[in-house]
Each structure stands twice: as structure tokens, then as C-alpha cells.
């Protein structure tokens, strides 16, 4: 058995057109799976598709706003139409609104919860039906260090990412009988568009992350490829309901 060979399988990565999503999509593609990346920005997807196809797999972009239940259903159906099956779902699309809790509007709250948490619930629910048809699957949900810690600027974000871990555990217990493994990944601080904004908005963030991280650096999207390969392949068939930090040691440093 080739532990990391998923040639012929099909993965969906929400928000796979850049950042961590593309890093994970490349990890899964390097194990042989065909890839659907989704997001709202088709322009950004062009370069991402090129880099995935360069790995020798088929890759397509499906436009979807994951805050919409109809778009989540369309994403799964369109993937089946393009590639005939869905084996792997990475719920990666996410956003943040950085304000102290007293300044967060109700709209801010719902925007973050809908984008980061409800989206994962909706996509997983539809993907579950598709995975039943192929005898099992892998779901990978993206948490954060804010699944573990709090920060004054991250009330809605931390709530959404804490929720991701608990939703992962609950779904893992429900769907183990269907040969579906559901796991979460908790990235440390990774250099992406999201954290470029964070570093503009949060004073001293760049240096304080570097100082606290035992690896002595920020992560980059390729750092996320290996965990995606592990959780998307049969290497992780007896691993479910976990939340794996990929953080250069950030979460274990005093
Ligand atoms: P990016 O901003 O680079 O990527 C976010 C992606 O999500 C984009 O590709 C965007 O695509 C997509 N997206 C956002 N909103 C929607 C929506 N409503 N519908 C569909 N797609 C959407 O950030 P990261 O790569 O940093 O973040 C990816 C994930 O990793 C997020 O869940 C984030 O919370 C998490 N994370 C990031 C960390 C970091 O340090 N960078 C640390 C811990 C967790 P488009 O604009 O085309 O819609």
C-alpha cells in the first residue's frame, strides 16, 4: 500500500486560490489528487491553477461564496460534474475583523462566524453525501492559534476558530462509521494576505510572533503542505477528531 498516493481522488479546497489554502492544495496535489479550488476572486485563481497543474494533476476553479448555502451545494455538485467524485474537503476560507469586543458590530460578528464556521458546517454537510457515494473521505478544517488562545482583537475570530475544533470533534464521532475522518489543523502565524493586514493593524505583531516562535520565524504557505498530505491520504486513516498545530512551536512555548 502506498500511504501517500491518492491518484484519481478529488479534493476541494475552499479559499484555495491563495495563502494557506493554496499551500495545502499543493500538498494534496503532490500526492496525485485532482483539485478544485474555490473562492470569490477568479483573477487570483489563475496563478493558483497554473501552479497546481504544474504538479501533474487536473485543477479547476469553482466560484463560490461559502457564506451562501446554495453556493456550498453548487461547489460540491460542480466538483462531481467536473471530476465525478469528492473524496477530500478542506474548509479553509476565512476572514477576520480586528476590533476590541466593545466595538464589534452584530454584522461584524455574523460576517466572521458565517465565513469561518457556518461555511465549514454547510460545505461539510453537502460533502458528506458525496463522500458516502465513494465509501469514505477526509475533511480538514482550518482552525488557528485562536482556537487555543484569546486576543483582545479577536473576539469573533477566536469564537469561530474555537467552534471549528469542537465541530470537528462532533463530526468525527458522527461520521467515523462512514469511513470519513474529520480533523482540524491549527496554523501558527503564516505570511499571507490575511496576516499582512494583521501586521498593519496590530502594533508590534511581526516581531512579537517571531520572538515567541521557537522556530524563530513566521510560517509560509508551503509549511502547510505536509499536514494536508497526511490528513488527505490513507496515512491518517486511524486519525480523527484531532486538532494539529502547525506553528513552529508557538503553542508550546512559555
Ligand atoms: P487569505 O486571506 O490569503 O485567504 C483567505 C481565503 O479565503 C481567500 O482565498 C479568499 O478567497 C477565501 N474567502 C474568504 N471569504 C470567502 C467567502 N465568503 N467565500 C469563499 N471564499 C472566501 O488568508 P489565509 O491564507 O491566511 O487564511 C486561510 C485560512 O487560514 C483562514 O481560515 C484563516 O483564518 C486561517 N488561518 C490563517 C493564519 C495565518 O497566520 N495566515 C493562522 C491561522 C489560521 P476570495 O477572496 O477569492 O474569496
Image: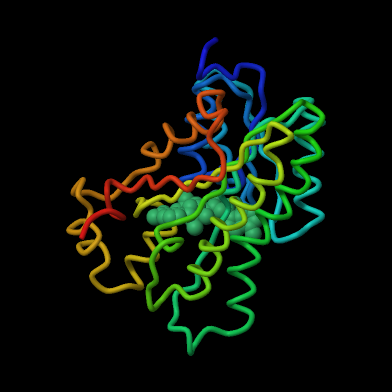
Q: Residue at x 21, y 64 (%)?
A: 208
Determine whether 114 is above or below 140 in the image. Answer: below
Spot occupied by residue 120 in the image (x, y as percentages of width and height): 65, 53
Spot occupied by residue 28 in the image (x, y as percentages of width and height): 53, 29
Spot occupied by residue 248 in the image (x, y as percentages of width and height): 28, 46
Residue 200 vs residue 32, the one in the foreground: 32
Determine whether 111 is above or below 238 in the image. Answer: below
Q: Residue at x 49, y 54 (%)?
A: 143
Specify the color scheme: rainbow
Q: Residue at x 27, y 74 (%)?
A: 203
Give the farthest residue toward the bottom: 102
In terms of image quadrants, where is residue 85? top right
Determine whether 224 is above or below 71 in the image. Answer: above
Residue 81 vs residue 174, the one in the foreground: 174
Spot occupied by residue 45 in the image (x, y as percentages of width and height): 58, 41
Residue 165 visible in rendering: yes
Q: Is residue 240 left or right of residue 121?
A: left
Residue 193 visible in rendering: no
Q: Residue at x 71, y 30 (%)?
A: 136
Q: Is residue 139 left or right of residue 214?
A: right
- Quarter the N terminus occupies: top right
Amino acid at each position: 500500500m502506498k500511504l501517500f498516493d491518492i491518484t484519481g481522488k478529488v479534493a476541494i479546497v475552499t479559499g484555495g486560490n491563495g495563502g494557506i489554502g493554496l499551500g495545502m492544495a499543493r500538498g494534496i496535489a503532490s500526492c496525485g489528487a485532482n483539485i478544485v479550488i474555490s473562492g470569490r476572486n477568479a483573477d487570483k485563481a489563475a496563478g493558483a491553477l497554473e501552479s497546481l497543474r504544474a504538479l501533474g494533476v487536473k485543477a479547476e476553479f469553482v466560484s463560490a461564496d461559502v457564506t451562501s448555502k446554495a453556493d456550498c451545494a453548487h461547489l460540491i455538485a460542480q466538483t462531481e460534474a467536473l471530476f465525478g467524485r469528492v473524496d477530500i474537503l478542506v474548509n479553509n476560507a476565512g476572514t477576520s475583523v480586528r476590533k476590541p469586543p466593545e466595538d464589534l458590530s452584530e454584522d461584524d460578528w455574523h460576517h466572521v462566524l458565517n465565513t469561518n464556521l457556518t461555511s465549514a458546517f454547510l460545505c461539510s454537510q453537502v460533502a458528506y453525501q458525496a463522500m458516502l457515494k465513494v465509501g469514505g473521505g477526509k475533511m480538514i478544517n482550518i482552525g488557528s492559534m485562536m482556537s487555543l488562545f484569546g486576543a483582545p482583537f479577536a473576539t469573533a475570530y477566536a469564537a469561530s476558530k474555537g467552534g471549528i475544533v469542537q465541530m470537528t470533534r462532533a463530526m468525527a464521532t458522527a461520521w467515523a462509521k462512514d469511513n470519513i475522518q474529520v480533523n482540524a489543523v491549527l496554523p501558527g502565524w503564516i505570511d499571507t494576505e490575511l496576516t499582512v493586514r494583521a501586521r498593519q493593524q496590530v502594533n508590534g505583531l511581526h516581531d512579537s510572533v517571531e520572538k515567541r516562535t521557537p522556530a524563530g520565524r513566521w510560517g509560509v504557505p508551503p509549511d502547510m503542505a505536509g499536514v494536508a498530505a497526511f490528513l488527505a491520504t490513507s496515512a491518517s486513516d486511524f486519525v480523527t477528531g484531532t486538532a494539529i498545530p502547525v506553528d513552529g512551536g508557538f503553542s508550546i512555548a512559555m
